Image (cartoon, rainbow, N blue to C red):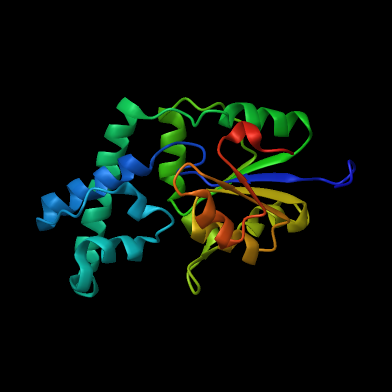
């Protein structure tokens, strides 16, 4: 990459900036248990990279198609309230995340979050963990997920900054996130083994695999 070219570091949120996956699983478990009397096998890895529709399917199975819009909204609202309560007690920034962001900004890079989570939840979670204001851009599902394809468009951040997606580095921890980044035309896609094994991320097409954010080279 030319030193005169503008670059962007694009990070997924859950499992990359914060280790939220176990809390998300517990929050969904409580919501479905309270409203529908449903619990599933306790394995938060089942959630990694799933869309909202896939989450309803995971818990409700064949009955997911019959869930009313009202019940879906009640489940999501209760899940979000439960998650934020748990997060206030347990969440911290992922080790190495703040140092990585500061390295990127010191090198003149833009920094962005592109996530499947709602933008409101991203901001509230960042407030809860007292994450420094190190992001130039935060895109949630309403900003970056194509409703027609259910694909997360990491290149949306690049286009907002008016830079080439090839000059971006994305860090993702899920198979779907890596595939979406590649489909977006991102130049360097890094798989972080915080949620899945290295071979799964490699098979998804990640250009590099790291076990810790300190290993990300800009």
Give the residue displayed 49% in from the left and 32% down from the top: 94
Q: Is residue 174 left or right of residue 52?
A: right
Name the image quarter holding the C terminus. Answer: top right
- Percent position of residue 148, x then y: 49, 74
Residue at the front extreme of this rendering: 199
Count of picture labels: 0
In the image, 119 versus 41, the foreground residue is 41
Give the residue displayed 22% in from the left and 68% down from the top: 61
**Is residue 153 among the parts visible in the rendering?**
no
In the image, 137 versus 63, the foreground residue is 63
In the image, 2 versus 192, the foreground residue is 192
Compared with 193, 166 (above or below) is: below
Q: Is residue 50 left or right of residue 182?
A: left
Q: Is residue 155 left or right of residue 145?
A: right
Compared with 178, 89 (above or below) is: above
In the image, 81 versus 107, the foreground residue is 107
- Percent position of residue 150, x then y: 48, 68
Give the residue displayed 34% in from the left and 55% down from the top: 46
- Percent position of residue 106, x then y: 76, 28
- Percent position of residue 162, x then y: 77, 54
**Is residue 181 among the parts visible in the rendering?**
yes
Give the quarter of the image for residue 67: bottom left
Give the residue displayed 21% in from the left and 49% down from the top: 29
């Amino acid at each position: 990459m030319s030193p005169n070219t503008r670059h962007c570091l694009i990070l997924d949120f859950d499992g990359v900036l914060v280790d939220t996956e176990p809390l998300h699983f517990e929050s969904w478990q409580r919501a479905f248990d309270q409203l529908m009397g449903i619990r599933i096998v306790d394995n938060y890895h089942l959630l990694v990279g799933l869309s909202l529709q896939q989450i309803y399917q995971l818990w409700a199975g064949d009955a997911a198609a019959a869930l009313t819009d009202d019940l879906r909204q009640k489940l999501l609202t209760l899940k979000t309230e439960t998650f934020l309560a748990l997060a206030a007690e347990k969440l911290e920034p992922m080790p190495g995340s703040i140092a990585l962001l500061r390295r990127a900004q010191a090198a003149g890079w833009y920094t962005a979050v592109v996530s499947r989570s709602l933008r409101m939840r991203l901001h509230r979670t960042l407030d809860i963990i007292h994450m420094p204001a190190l992001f130039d851009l935060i895109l949630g599902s309403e900003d970056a997920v194509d409703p027609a394809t259910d694909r997360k468009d990491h290149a949306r951040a690049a286009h907002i900054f008016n830079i080439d997606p090839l000059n971006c580095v994305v860090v993702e921890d899920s198979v779907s996130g890596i595939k979406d980044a590649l489909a977006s035309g991102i130049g360097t896609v890094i798989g972080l083994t915080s949620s899945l094994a290295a071979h799964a991320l490699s098979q998804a097409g990640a250009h590099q695999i790291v076990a810790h954010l300190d290993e990300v080279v800009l």
